[in-house]
Image (cartoon, rainbow, N blue to C red):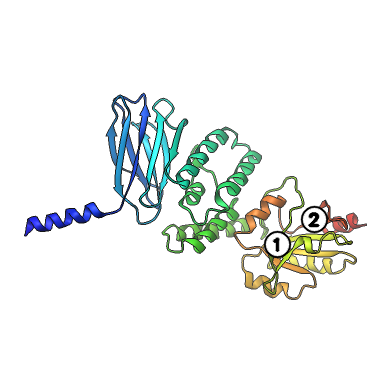
Amino acid sequence: MASAAFLAAALTACSDPSFTVKGTVADADGRTITLEKADHAGQWVAIDSASLNAKGAFSFSHIAPADPEIYRLRMGGTDNYIYFPVDSVETITIQASAPRFATDFSVAGSPQAEAMARFEKELLKAAPALSDPDSARNFKRHVFTTYLQEGKGSVLSYYILTKTVGGEPLFKVPDDASYFAAVATAFREYRPDDPRLPLLTATATSARQKGKAAAGHRKVVQASEISYIDINLPSVDGKERRLSDIAGKGEPTLLVFSDLSDPATPSLNAELRKLQGVRIYNVGLDDDQLTWRNAATNLPWTCVFASDSDTPGLIGSYQLASLPAIFIIDAAGNLNARCNSMADVRRKLR
């Protein structure tokens, strides 16, 4: 009976779905390579190791994770790592050399693993310049549009948001609240049962609250040069309204980014109501859509709502510095002014 029970257990274990990571590491004769796994708190645990011979070949197979996980290979006792995600039962193939283990490598086997390798190499190249605030902002915008915007709740998105460079987080609270919010929204939509979602949601909420407190209830975002990029968002009635539907139609248009729940916004709206011969396209960056809708219903111009997933794209496109932010699009449809105040708006509309 005992032998039968043991055999049944062994057969069950053999039938468990597994993933494989294999490859070669050149110039690694006598070195040890270790497979490590990250838990949801970001702690790394060694789960397997192998001694390499002159050929440098290795292969690890383990039970596939219930949810996508991040793994890494570690060369010997060094701080040289190659990171890769495992979603299910894929086979990941890694080629590297011991002298340049963490800098000159290739990863194949899944689109996510290959994307992570590209991100790691881009980060390695950008790292020396990240101490400069402008360089850091530009790199993070690039990372968002390249890896996060279409992430759909991927483990790669989570990994990138929790990445550290030189002991400092790449994405920080509260500065990068919009990025955390966008990824949390994607997880809620595509991976609502993922164990990382509660932490992402809590971080996004904390970042938003701290950002408002630090900026006097103004959302602080990036500022630089801008260009006229069309916007298409839902209005109060739920139907989408394009900026291009009203801009460039023979009258100037004000493109206004605001938070209708901000105590200072009613006075801004009162000033906007006084303007004549101008159209207004008002993008709401409020935290709560219901609160925004109740306030926007009473406004006589086009009001649209930007969700958490829409906000980072608007930040990147229009390089917003703070809210409210106002831009003038002339009668021909050219974006020709950024205004710092309503007095500035009136002066530039003359």
73 or 275, which lies in front? Answer: 73
Q: Which residue is mark 1?
A: 232
For the point 44% across and 27% down, which residue is it? 100
Q: Quadrant of the N terminus?
A: bottom left
Residue 44 visible (yes or no): no
Q: Quadrant of the C terminus?
A: bottom right
Q: Label 2 vs label 1: CA separation?
A: 17 Å
> Residue pushed farthest left?
1
Q: Quadrant of residue 213?
A: bottom right
Secondary structure found at label 1: strand
For the point 57% across and 32% down, which residue is it? 128
Q: Which residue is mark 2?
A: 327
Residue 320 position in % (x across, y down): 71, 52
Secondary structure found at label 2: strand
The amino acid type, in three-letter code, at marker 2 is Phe
Residue 167 position in % (x across, y down): 48, 39
Disc 2 crowd, CA 10 A, few/some/many (<14, 14-19, 20+): many
Residue 163 position in % (x across, y down): 49, 44
The amino acid type, in three-letter code, at marker 1 is Asn
